[in-house]
Amino acid sequence: MAVFPTPQPFDLPALRFADFAGILWSGPGETLNPLSGEGFFIPTSSGKAALCLALQDLRASGRIPDKNVNVMVPKWLDYAVYSVMHLHAFPSQDPDGELAAMVVYHQYGFAQDMDAISAFAVERGLPIIEDCAHAIAGEYHGRRLGSFGDYAVFSFSKFFPCIMAGGLWVRNADAYERIVKAAGRNHKPYLQAYSLAIRLLHDLAADGSPGLLNRLLETSYAVYDRHPRINALVVRLLRRQLAQPVLRMRRNNWRVLRQTLAGTEMLAGLEETATPYCVPLKIPNHRRDQALAAARAHGIRTGYYKFDEARNLLYPDFQDRLLVPVHQGLDEAAVARIGKDLRSAVANNGARP
């Protein structure tokens, strides 16, 4: 994944302290629901832990009889997500095969075609888990992402400066009660301490993570379902983050980038209603090197990554896109400069910045 300039550390020391201070006392804390007024929300230690809880509940309810049953997943998803899924089900990319559920990933914060996907799920009788790790505040046809399925997974650490923090939205009250009990029963504080320590060391190593740290991080994914709870200190600090104009700043930066690149093909297929994790820009093949150089000249360590232009995990169309940031660590002037230089680099007569 691309590495972007660090967001402004509003509560970075406090959040990191709270991550560790709450290891011995982890509880649900205060309400923290991105889909305010709908369903039920369970703060978790990470987005992966939230996904494990959803899959565990589908097992408990009999919707997934055993871990060898197929669950539909996108073709372009982090291997760590597939890894934790193997604890509870078998990830499948075949929409025509036998399926027990679907995981729908709103890639980089841009919505999947929920009309087509929901119709498929209803026809097949499949529960939907929406992966909103990149879509904390997005919309699809005026409806909040995360509210289309039976469960929705969130990852706050992708938007706010903390080591690990996530959440699980649940539509059904009975499922909510089952999950809360399971989370309390399965939580192991010493495994949470292990995962937090490895994650912190890995993040601090930045560019040069030693091979051992990478391997330890990979092994920690296997225990994410054993420490699903989050401590109340982190929840309170995240509530404070959500109360600040952090997401509005991200949306404003996305607006500025759209205005700067208006009239170009770089924005093809990207809706203005998104609150992006990052923005996948479409770059002509003959200007790819120039655009990449322009982005890197601003200190953005990025590259070309696959993006589903069809926005449909059933029948995707993955194409290379250049990822650029719009997070709250950048002000509008900085985003405008990035957009201006990218526009110049992509223009047929544009010179490399």
Image: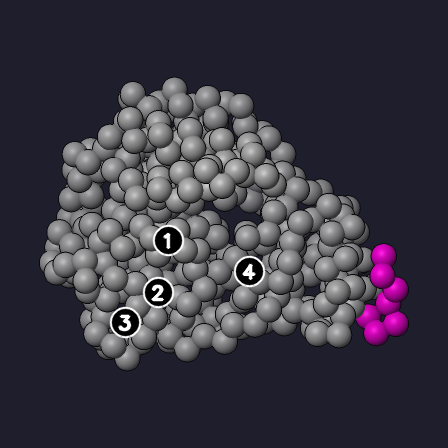
| Tags 1 and 2 touching, CB below 8 Å | yes
Which numbered disc, 4 or 3, marks the residue that appears first in the sequence?
Answer: 3
Asked if residue 55 shows in the view, the reply is no
Give the residue number, with chain letter if any, for mark 4.
Answer: 273
Which numbered disc, 1 or 3, marks the residue that appears first in the sequence?
Answer: 1
Specify the amino acid type for callout 2: Val
Specify the amino acid type for callout 4: Thr
**Residue displayed at 12% across by 55% down:** 61
Percent x, y for residue 31? 34, 35
Check disc 3: other Cα within 10 Å, few if <14, some if 14-19, many if 20+. some
Above/below status of 352 relative to 245? below
**Residue displayed at 23% across by 58% down:** 89
Residue furthest front in the image: 211
Instruction: Report the disc number at residue 121.
Output: 3
Q: Judge whether residue 348 is colored magenta.
A: yes
First to last magenta residue range: 347-353
Which numbered disc, 2 or 3, marks the residue that appears first in the sequence?
Answer: 2
| C-alpha separation, residue under disc 1 versus residue under disc 2 | 10 Å
Give the residue number, with chain letter if any, for mark 1.
Answer: 81
**Residue displayed at 33% across by 61% down:** 103
Q: Judge whether residue 239 is colored magenta.
A: no
Check disc 2: other Cα within 10 Å, few if <14, some if 14-19, many if 20+. many
**Relative depth, front residue between 241 and 200:** 200
Above/below status of 290 relative to 231? below
Specify the amino acid type for callout 1: Val
